[in-house]
Image (tube, coloured by chain):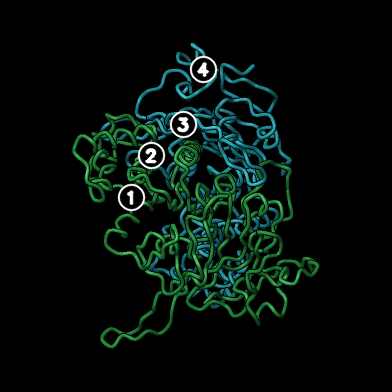
Chain colours: A green, B cyan
Amino acid sequence: MTELLLEARAAQKYFPVQKGLLFAKTVGHIKAVDGVSFSIEEGKTFGLVGESGCGKTTMAKCILLLEKLTSGQVFVGGRDISKLNGEQLKQYRGMVQAVFQDPYSSLSPRMRVRDIVAEPVVVNRRLSRKELKERVTEVMGVVGLHEEMGNRYPHEFSGGQRQRVAVARALSLSPKLMVLDEPISALDVSIRAQIMNLLRQLQAQYSLSYLLIAHDLAVVRHMSDQVGVMYLGKIVEYADSNELYAKTLHPYTKALVSAAMPSEPGVRRDEIVLSGEVPSPLNPPPGCRFHPRCPFAMPKCSEGEPALVEAFPGHKVACFLHSDKVAQPEATTVSSNGKKPS
Amino acid sequence: MADGNGNTPLLQVKDLKTYLFTRYAVVRAVDGITFDLKEGENLGLVGESGCGKTMTGLSLLRLLPQPAGRIVGGQIIFDGQDILTLDDDEFRKLRGTQMSMILQDPMTSLNPVFTIGDQVGEPLLLHQGLKGNGLKDKVVELLRLVRIPVAEVRVRDFPHQMSGGMRQRIVGAIAMSCNPKLLIADEPTTALDVTTQIYFLKLMRELQQQFGMAMIWITHDFGIVNRMCDRIAVMYAGRFMEIGPLVEMFKRPVHPYTIALLNSVPRVDRKVDQLYSIEGQPPDLRQEMVGCPFAPRCSRVKPICREQYPDEVVLDSSHKAYCWDVK
């Protein structure tokens, strides 16, 4: 069937924390990404969901080679991206492009839109001036911008149009994989649908693969084929998008689903309200990282860390509730642990 | 629905117009809105950024950016008195005691150089004249109310020592400190993480049951409205498009903008192939508008829409829309 375009195997990214100025020594590590594995098929979208600080953006940066993995590998098109150099690296950069969250800060205010869209091509390819102009006009047309808009500066555009410029820039090298880091969170409600529709249409047209990073489950559901839910640097649940919503297993995912809000009044599902905050990745809690906030926590959750196991075909979950497929214990009320996150 | 027993509403806003007079142009931020709010009621003010919902909130508290912002027309009757006729000193007695506000970003709405205790205590000191131990006890009590763990120790902490969710709860405690009758929450959870968001909303709901204040929720998120509100007003370009009870608005929206907005939001409970998208951009409020502001983006536009602002169409006593195409 479809081929794997990207595969991450036990990816880890630790940031050292140093103390002292002259004789700085490393006193600990922030485990931003701690053993994350996932894969993206060609032409499909993989959604990475989680709250801020869970490591989803760090993972994206590692894929874009803006950060180097501490350990583990990422394979794109069968090649380990950490071993690329020279011409191959250049090729890789053309193959993988990104669209960032805030089009107000990701576009240079001093460049004309035409030059912004052209820049990746100028850097990575050798095209004549005429070919370059044609390419820019083409990608701008694809994202729904007129050619003459190219002469303007980013500040003359609205948020939605700016995000279109960012998409055009990413498209200019005909990439295979696009990393979309919260591509719509900075946009207005009525504009979000425009950009989501555009991204899906482009995917169908060019069989692009997307790595979509978002915190809103409804958005991820709309866009993704597969979803990974991240909590404190680890994937806690991993499944097909439809499967994940039909059969949510991990308590954290359940909390996210109930946080994604009812879309209609009256539909009040069981709500899981978490108390407390996400603990610091510098000093994650022992055992399951979610257990201090988990309404279903059992004694063994604080002792050992549950592995990511396949509970149903293609549906993985890291939770003791499901690791041995025991019947789900009765829901206890959410306890306020009153602990101060360190 | 939380309903007051009196017949006169707590708040009546009549044809409120708030303009911003900048050096280059006059921005018609709020251009004639009318609504009322009963005691203990939750009204959601929904719209895109720049539609005037925040300016509406700030007008109610007379906190408009100075010197640009001015209320140029209309009436705001709160608890029987027209607050636009009060002078600043008189109004100051009302703001913070009878009506208060929770702002969007708890990172910037708390002062970084004062302790939590100082900031929560300030309205109590100013409005209720509490001092010494009485003040301290009340502050700790308020912090406990918003579930700050070990409140008696954390009163001495500074805002940066608190997480985002705690900070927003502290802002909530400040706003609630003098038992206001009206609380305006301007995008209170936008800066918070999803799971913290729910916790905050649930807490607010409990506090509201305890203290019975009316609330205006300013938001662009239908989920929040859905969870918290009794009625919704949909705003666009400084005007109301539609206002009505929550269930009515979700089940039977009539205004093309409301319908489009509801259809453009992805849903967690089902997957659609394509979202409805509203083409075009919201209008520039610096230009005077003729006709319905939504006309250029509306799929059901008629010639008259471009010429004249629609009259109010009353569907039933509480559900009203402003559209020529609605009967």
Q: Is residue B243 left or right of residue B7?
A: left
Discs 4, 3: same chain: yes
Secondary structure under tag 4 reads loop
Q: Quadrant of residue B158?
A: bottom left
Secondary structure under tag 2 reads helix
Discs 4, 1: same chain: no
The reply to whether residue B125 is visible in this rendering is no
Q: Which residue is mark 1?
A: A106
Between disc 2 and disc 1, the foreground one is 2
Q: Which residue is mark 2?
A: A164
Where A40 falls versus A206 (above or below)?
below
Per the model, the C-alpha gap separating discs 2 and 1 is: 12 Å
Q: Which residue is mark 4?
A: B301
Nearest the camera: A108 or B306?
A: A108
Q: Position of residue B214 (x, y in %)?
A: 63, 46
Q: Which residue is mark 3?
A: B238
Discs 2, 1: same chain: yes
**Given the image, on which type of amino acid does mark 4 rest?**
Val
Q: Is residue A25 left or right of residue B147?
A: left
Per the model, the C-alpha gap separating discs 4 and 3 is: 19 Å
